[in-house]
């Protein structure tokens, strides 16, 4: 059981890590085959395994650790990052994993692991609680969600998450915003976060910075989507569905 204890310490692991432990590829293959059969280990997908608890049979790595190890540079993002950070109370079956290298979506232990094209590396970090977990930090999670509204998280859900965050760091927001390379990100970010300015402890200087970047063009909060009634938010040169006029003030209306 020596090898099992070593794999248990890893939690989630790849084939090459087993080779390093055994010193031989054939031995590693034989060990994994034996351990999967005995239900000491479960095969998640090609070249990805997880140790199992011998009493309960449950994986010893959670969905966040599994997602972080699908590729060499994968990390938890969007809705799933909010869940890990405690900013969303419901548990969803979809786990959003960003990675430059695409992987085929798969299901394991009741969760669907979904690929999201990674935008850039800045704003990702290793969890302080678990070194096996890579995740976007609070500010990057908010901005990715704004950039991908209605793809992986709705504005209603994002509003709930924002209401649960203790604050946002304006310097980080400004640094990350420059990485998207889109003026519309300053428009959308300014409009949405201004509605939560007090809760997120953001100074007026941050919003002045965003306004200085937006240029003269108008933009849609939801480009390509049809709404019966929309209005023009002049301060952000943004066309917004009427139902979001009270965003941040009367959440029951959305």
Image: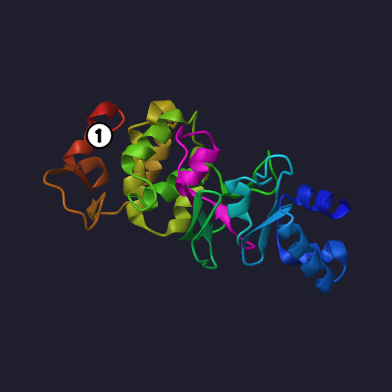
Q: Is residue 19 above or below residue 189?
A: below
**Pointer 1 local density, CA inside 10 Å: few below 14, some 14–19, many at least 20:** some
Left or right: where 35 falls relative to 69: right
Query: Looking at this rendering, what residue extends furthest in the left direction?
Result: 228
Q: Is residue 213 visible?
A: no
Q: Is residue 58 left or right of residue 203?
A: right
Residue highlighted by disc 1: 254
At a point 29% along the width and 29% down the height, the residue shown is: 251
- Is residue 192 or residue 90 the one in the foreground? 90
Task: Looking at the picture, tell me which residue is in the foreground, 199 or 109.
Answer: 109
Above or below, 205 relative to 185: above
Is residue 76 covered in magenta? yes
**Does the magenta portion include 98?**
no
Q: Nearer the viewer, residue 254 or 201?
A: 254
Q: Which residues are magenta?
A: 71-96
Q: Position of residue 171 (x, y in %)?
A: 52, 42
Secondary structure type for disc 1: loop
**x and y percentages locating residue 49 in the rendered image:** 68, 58
Is 56 placed above or below 120 here?
above
């Amino acid at each position: 059981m020596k090898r099992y204890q070593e794999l248990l310490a890893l939690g989630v692991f790849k084939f090459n890590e087993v080779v390093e432990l055994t010193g031989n590829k054939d031995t590693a293959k034989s060990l994994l085959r034996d351990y999967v059969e005995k239900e000491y280990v479960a095969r998640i997908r090609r070249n990805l395994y997880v140790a199992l608890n011998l009493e309960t049979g449950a994986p010893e790595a959670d969905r966040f650790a599994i997602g972080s190890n699908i590729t060499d540079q994968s990390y938890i993002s969007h809705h799933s990052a909010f869940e890990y950070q405690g900013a969303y109370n419901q548990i969803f079956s979809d786990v959003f994993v960003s990675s430059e290298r695409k992987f085929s979506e798969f299901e394991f232990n009741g969760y669907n692991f979904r690929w999201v094209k990674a935008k850039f590396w800045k704003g990702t970090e290793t969890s302080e609680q678990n070194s096996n977990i890579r995740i976007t930090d609070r500010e990057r999670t908010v901005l990715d969600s704004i950039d991908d509204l209605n793809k992986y998280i709705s504005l209603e859900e994002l509003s709930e998450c924002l209401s649960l965050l203790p604050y946002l760091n304006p310097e980080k927001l400004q640094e990350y915003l420059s990485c998207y390379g889109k003026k519309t990100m300053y428009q959308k970010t300014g409009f949405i976060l201004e509605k939560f300015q007090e809760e997120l402890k953001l100074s007026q200087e941050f919003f002045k910075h965003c306004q200085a970047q937006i240029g003269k063009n108008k933009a849609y909060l939801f480009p390509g989507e049809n709404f019966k009634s929309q209005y023009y938010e002049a301060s952000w040169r943004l066309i917004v569905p009427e139902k979001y006029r009270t965003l941040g003030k009367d959440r029951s209306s959305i």
